[in-house]
């Protein structure tokens, strides 16, 4: 972003940027804030990735090699918190900041000052979280779900973790409010809701989910805090509380949360596939309705995370069927993506490769999700590596691949240069292969009964664990190519045209590349 | 006609109210779940069970073992007066637990029962139990407390031993030491 915009384009005569560090500290420009979000997410992605590699290092061989179990558990817990709240969610908020105003023809996000706050809370939140590693008793080690009574037994890391979660939650809520206000009030004249690009649609629905559930998480962890320090008994059986109730409240947040992390990914893929298939998206309206029904259904399936808590059979049946019902709108989406490709003149540049990879691997994760939804099977595989495999298939190969796809798709618009297709393709193929090398064996491990969150394992699991660890190292190293591709693209390269992708048809491609610092100050005309 | 920035602030205010309301909703889930458990009878820890007047199956004998535990370093002594009884399903049985406060302060505790095998819980009907209320003991005080129960005759044939285990928790949260 270092280069001044040379386009003396029509009414953008003074494309003035504030200079120095103040540009970033006091940023109110949606593009600057979007960039900061994305860079922050990238850093957190590497922090969380380093933790994952340490976990795989310990699991490379059976027996205890490097860490004591407490530290191992802190790694597992923090890896999840960092990746979810520091990696995936800020990356999506960053993409939303950059692309939503451009896609709806708005000059900026609706609430620029709040936008600045919501970003700058994050570094503090994660400093708190990471600093908890240096307190007495080490980092949070009770799992990212913070189930009591285990999480209440943590040392001084406990309040730090809780406050970090409060701050991340506040940041997400502010970001979500901004997205809703922008999309509801700032659309260019003529852009009706059913003309919104799908990325905006999925983000709008995600933002409503965020507003509905992040405060519930804040409430749940506040109750943990008062249970621990102020003698309340929300989850403490001695005072009439119930630890299982925490799980109910947590998963009331937790299940919509997994859709918060996947719906924007659906949006990105719904933009990328039509652009490279050179056909309009198949079934636009059904995509919107499918996304909405996934969002609504996500509120009535939470207890499928709790099949082993001793729920009545009627409850298990209800949550099993409700969960399976979600496969219907998801299936509609997958069908639409494939129908969009059908008879399209497809080319496979990096964004399209990642979108296809997403489609393939995410669907596999979806199927294992269906397997987990079946109560009797879930009772068997609860808390095993099968579940670990399942959610990494939907989160890494789902959300993360979509973020990669969107990044390569929009990099030319952000930097004004084409990224290196060679680096991008190498990044894709290595990621896809190593991803599967890492996580596919975990299905077998889980089915054979290897429990998650345990630093040691029985000898019969040794071979698959070794394969998974090798894959993890390869996957981690492959991500350096991503950084290389971004840096190379930001510093220079082939000049990007306004619309580098032939089939792309949303508003951002009507702007020159790089997008001018102030765009759409006069709203565009929507046909 | 309101300007766009005014409209934005207006929408933002509405959404902020929604998120504050959802924060409250999180807390409202607590009584809500309790009510659901009460109505559906999922979690009846502190209430006597209703029992139907059933036949005593004198041909069948079940061993009931009694266990006692103390949590959060509770300075009490807590034990059943007999470690096990042999009874017939349908038979009304009374056993006694004893607690003593060994510390020099008054302490309130709450006992939570659990059953092994877990499946036996639904057939284990307690008519009276010290676990239905909190117990406050003065320094040095000791107390004998009954558990009156019936094992329902529907108990599956393969279950011939049931362990009833109580854990006493200290209720005074403020007095709990951190860590």
Image (cartoon, rainbow, N blue to C red):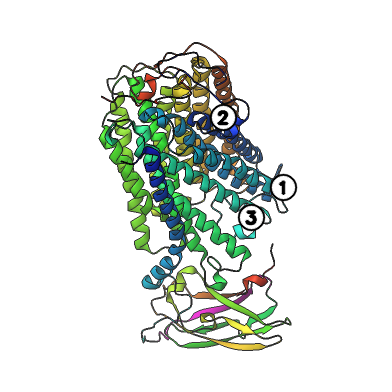
Task: Say which mark, if any, is on residue A357.
Answer: none
- The answer to whether marks 2 and 1 sit on the same chain is yes
Chain for disc number 3: A
> Around disc 3, counting alpha carbons within 10 Å, would you say few (fewer than 14), some (14 to 19), or many (20 or more)?
many
User: Mark 1 highlights which residue?
Assistant: A134
Q: CA distance from mark 3 to mark 2?
A: 32 Å
Residue A396 at x, y percent in the picture: 49, 35
Q: Is A36 colored magenta in this rendering?
A: no
Quadrant that contains the N terminus of chain A: top right
Chain for disc number 1: A
Q: Are marks 3 and 1 in contact (CB under 8 Å)?
A: no
Magenta stretch bounds = B56-73
**Lower sequence index among marks 2 and 1:** 1
Residue A267 at x, y percent in the picture: 38, 33
User: Mark 2 highlights which residue?
Assistant: A475
Place residue B71 in its image quadrant. Answer: bottom right
Residue reaching furthest to the top: A494
Secondary-structure class at tag 1: helix
Q: Is residue B91 above or below residue B26?
A: below
Secondary-structure class at tag 2: helix
Q: Residue at x 64, y 52 (%)?
A: A160
Chain for disc number 2: A
Secondary-structure class at tag 3: helix
**Lower sequence index among marks 3 and 2:** 3
Residue A451 in view in this figure: no
Q: Is residue A527 above or below residue A237?
A: above
Q: Is residue A192 left or right of residue B74?
A: left
**Lower sequence index among marks 3 and 1:** 1
Q: Residue at x 49, y 53 (%)?
A: A217
Nearest to the eye among marks 2 and 1: give it. 1
Residue B110 in view in this figure: yes
Residues A39 and A258: in front is A39
């Amino acid at each position: 972003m270092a280069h001044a915009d040379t386009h003396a384009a029509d009414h953008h005569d003074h494309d003035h940027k504030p200079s120095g560090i103040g540009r970033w500290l006091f940023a109110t420009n949606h593009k600057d804030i979007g960039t900061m979000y994305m860079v922050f997410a990238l850093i957190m992605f590497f922090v969380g990735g380093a933790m994952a590699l340490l976990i795989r290092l310990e699991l490379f061989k059976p027996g205890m090699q490097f860490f004591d179990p407490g530290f191992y558990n802190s790694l597992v817990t923090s890896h999840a918190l960092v990746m979810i709240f520091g990696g995936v969610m800020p990356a999506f908020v960053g993409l939303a900041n950059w692309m939503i105003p451009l896609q709806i023809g708005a000059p900026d996000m609706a609430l620029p000052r709040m936008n600045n706050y919501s970003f700058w809370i994050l570094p503090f939140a994660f400093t708190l979280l990471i600093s908890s590693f240096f307190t007495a008793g080490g980092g949070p080690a009770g799992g990212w779900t913070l189930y009591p009574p285990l999480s209440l037994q943590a040392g001084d890391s406990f309040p730090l973790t809780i406050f970090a979660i409060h701050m991340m939650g506040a940041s997400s809520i502010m970001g979500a409010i901004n997205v809703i206000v922008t999309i509801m009030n700032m659309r260019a004249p003529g852009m009706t809701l059913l003309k919104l690009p799908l990325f905006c649609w999925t983000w709008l629905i995600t933002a409503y989910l965020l507003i509905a559930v992040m405060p519930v998480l804040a409430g749940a962890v506040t109750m943990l805090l008062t249970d621990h320090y102020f003698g309340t008994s929300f989850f403490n059986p001695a005072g009439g509380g119930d630890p299982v109730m925490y799980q109910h409240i947590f998963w009331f947040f937790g299940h919509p949360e997994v859709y918060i992390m996947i719906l924007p990914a659906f949006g990105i893929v719904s933009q990328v596939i039509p652009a490279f298939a050179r056909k309009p998206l198949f079934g636009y309206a059904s995509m919107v309705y499918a996304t909405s029904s996934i969002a609504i259904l996500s509120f009535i399936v939470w207890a499928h995370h709790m099949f082993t808590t001793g729920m009545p059979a009627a409850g298990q049946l209800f949550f099993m069927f409700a969960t399976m019902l979600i496969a219907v709108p998801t299936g509609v989406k997958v069908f639409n993506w494939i129908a969009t490709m059908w008879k399209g003149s497809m080319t496979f540049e990096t964004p399209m490769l990642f979108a296809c990879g997403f489609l393939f691997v995410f669907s596999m994760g979806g199927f294992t999700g269906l397997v987990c939804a079946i109560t009797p099977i879930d009772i068997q595989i609860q808390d095993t590596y099968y579940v670990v495999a399942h959610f990494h298939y939907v989160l890494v190969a789902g959300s993360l691949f979509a973020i990669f796809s969107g990044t390569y798709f929009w990099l030319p618009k952000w930097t004004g240069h084409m990224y290196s297709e060679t680096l991008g393709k190498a990044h894709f193929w290595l990621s896809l292969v190593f991803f599967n090398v890492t996580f596919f064996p975990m299905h077998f491990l889980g089915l054979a009964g290897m429990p998650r969150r345990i630093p040691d394992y029985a000898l019969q699991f040794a071979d698959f664990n070794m394969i998974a660890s090798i894959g993890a190292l390869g996957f981690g190293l492959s991500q350096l190519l991503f950084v290389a591709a971004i840096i190379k693209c930001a510093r220079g390269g082939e000049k990007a045209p306004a619309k580098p992708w032939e089939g792309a048809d949303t508003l951002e491609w009507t702007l020159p590349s790089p997008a001018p610092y102030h765009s759409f100050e006069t709203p565009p005309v929507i046909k | 006609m309101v300007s766009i920035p005014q409209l934005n602030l207006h929408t933002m205010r509405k959404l902020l109210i929604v998120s504050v309301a959802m924060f409250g909703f999180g807390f409202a889930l607590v009584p809500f779940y309790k009510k659901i458990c009460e109505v559906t009878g999922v979690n009846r820890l502190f209430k006597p069970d209703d029992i139907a007047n059933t036949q005593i199956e004198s041909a069948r004998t079940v061993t009931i073992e009694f266990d006692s535990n103390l949590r959060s370093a509770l300075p009490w002594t807590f034990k059943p007066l007999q470690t096990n009884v042999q009874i017939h399903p349908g038979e009304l049985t009374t056993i006694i637990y004893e607690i003593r406060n060994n510390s020099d302060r008054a302490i309130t505790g709450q006992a939570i029962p659990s059953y092994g095998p877990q499946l036996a819980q639904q057939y284990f009907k307690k008519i009276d139990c010290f676990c239905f209320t909190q117990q406050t003991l003065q320094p040095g005080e000791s107390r004998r407390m009954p558990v009156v129960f019936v094992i329902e005759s529907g108990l599956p044939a393969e279950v011939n031993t049931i362990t009833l285990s109580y854990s006493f928790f200290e209720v005074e949260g403020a007095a709990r030491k951190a860590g």
